[in-house]
Image: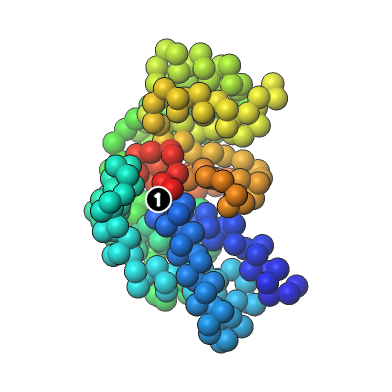
Amino acid sequence: MPLGEQVANNLPYLRRYARALTGSQSTGDAFVRQTLEAALADDDLKASLADGRVPLYRAFNKIWASAHMEVAGAGMGASDHEAAAHDRLSTITPLNRQALLLTTLEDFSIDQAAEIMNLDSDSVQKLVQEAVEEIDRESATSVLIIEDEPLISMQLEDLVTSLGHEICGTAATRTQAQEVVAQRTPGLVLADIQLADGSSGLDAVDDILAIDSVPVIFITAYPERLLTGDRPEPTYLVTKPFKEATVRTAISQALFFNSSRPIA
């Protein structure tokens, strides 16, 4: 496969990682763009990308590691939402979040994450554990699950309650979601894209966001359809079939930034 095609295939997932790491589509994309520009300017770096996702993410993390303090202080002159997100970024150790996102959201092994982060495997394992402990300290909230597959819905219910949150309702259609929200606005939404009656989880979420700004995590079997870069994208996107650790990480990220709306 030509190098350009290989990088292009991996790019949507690198953009997902960058957005989750920064809490911002525009900031994440800027880091991805800098990574590609660095590769174009360095023949050795460019050649290394032929070895797959690990060197691509490693190149990205070098850019991020050298500049994340600028992101943490980048709230000046930004919107209230963006400034708040950047303020929150400065309150926790970026390495913890990198390690957790790489091994859950991006499904790298501990050894692969260690290579990406230029650390030894034991250090990465420790960082992941520290990040999990931070997740466990998150404030409890109420969660609405919009999912038309009963078994998946039950799995998500069990996971959410095991994390100390409560279920304010479940819905298999847009109409059912509207009925739940009419009774109580959730503190977090987990939403599938395609629902039982042909309605859209995206539309159901738009209904909720018209009432209040609520953190949303989209769960879909086709994430690449929403990672095109053509429009504002969901900030938190989990791929089906999912691992519980991946959803757990996404919940932590969404509650950390306390918003579902992409920071443009």
Image quarter of the N terminus = bottom right
Q: Which residue is mark 1?
A: 23
Crowding near the residue tagged with mark 1, few <14, some 14–19, many ≥20 C-alpha atoms within 10 Å: many
Residue 229 appearing in the image? yes
- The quadrant in which residue 5 appears is bottom right
- Please state which of residues 66 and 171 is positioned toward the viewer in this rendering: 66
In the displayed structure, would residue 150 be above or below residue 119? Answer: above
Side (left or right) of 124 relative to 78: right
Residue 97, image x and y in percent?
Answer: 37, 57
- Percent across and percent down for residue 210 are 45, 25
Name the residue at 41% across, 36% down.
215
Q: Quadrant of residue 74?
A: bottom left
Residue reaching furthest bottom? 44
Amino acid type at mark 1: Gly
Residue at 35% x, 33% y: name it. Answer: 164
Q: Residue at left 45%, top 18%?
A: 181
- In the image, residue 178 sits, relative to residue 222, either above or below, namely above
Is 129 placed above or below 111 here?
above
